[in-house]
Image (spheres, helix red, strand yellow):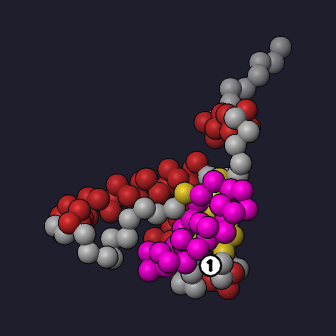
Amino acid sequence: MSYPQPLTPGERLADAKKRLSLPRIVVICGSTRFMTEMAEADLRETEAGRIVVKPGCDMKSPHELWSDPVEAEALKARLDDLHRAKIRLADEVLVVGDYIGDSTRAEIAYARSLGKPVRFTHPEVDPDA
């Protein structure tokens, strides 16, 4: 006699999204030097009927929240964890910009390890192309 296998967390999430009739969720990744381009991508993806999540902080721009180097390092680690959670939540990844740094490269690898489709605004920068 065989028993049904319990759903994985990813399968449970996909099932919940389906039951809620949620549109596709796109996470925007890329260097924060492309925040303007990310805002444009957000607009276009939203217009296409997708839910968009993206980086919420540009730590390259001055702000009191990350003015202390020690606190900034801790915040960066928390934001990296948060962005990986956004990748897990999303149905697909959109990489914005014509440059891929170490953080974005790691996000792409993470998304692909989860089986998430990855699109690029500049396909020539795909590290696996």
Given residues 34 and 112, the one toward you in this image is 34
Residue at 69% in and 63% down: 47
48 relative to 87 in the view: left or right: right
Residue 10, horizontal then vertical, whole percent: 64, 41
Q: How many marks?
A: 1
Q: Which residues are magenta?
A: 27-52
- The residue carrying pointer 1 sits among few (fewer than 14), some (14 to 19) or many (20 or more) residues within 10 Å by Cα, namely few
Q: What residue do we see at 52% from left, 53% from top?
A: 86
Out of 88 and 35, give the one closest to the viewer: 35
Q: Amino acid at mark 1?
A: Pro
**Is 30 one of the magenta-colored residues?**
yes
Can residue 31 be spotted in the picture?
Answer: no
Predominant secondary structure in magenta? helix
At which x and y percent is residue 84? 49, 55
Q: Secondary structure at mark 1?
A: loop
* Residue 18 lies in quadrant: top right
> In percent of the image, x 55 and y 57: which residue is there?
53
Specify whether 41 is left or right of 66: right
- 45 vs 101, left or right, is right
Quarter of the image where one finds residue 111: bottom right
- Residue positioned most to the right: 1
Q: Which residue is mark 1?
A: 127
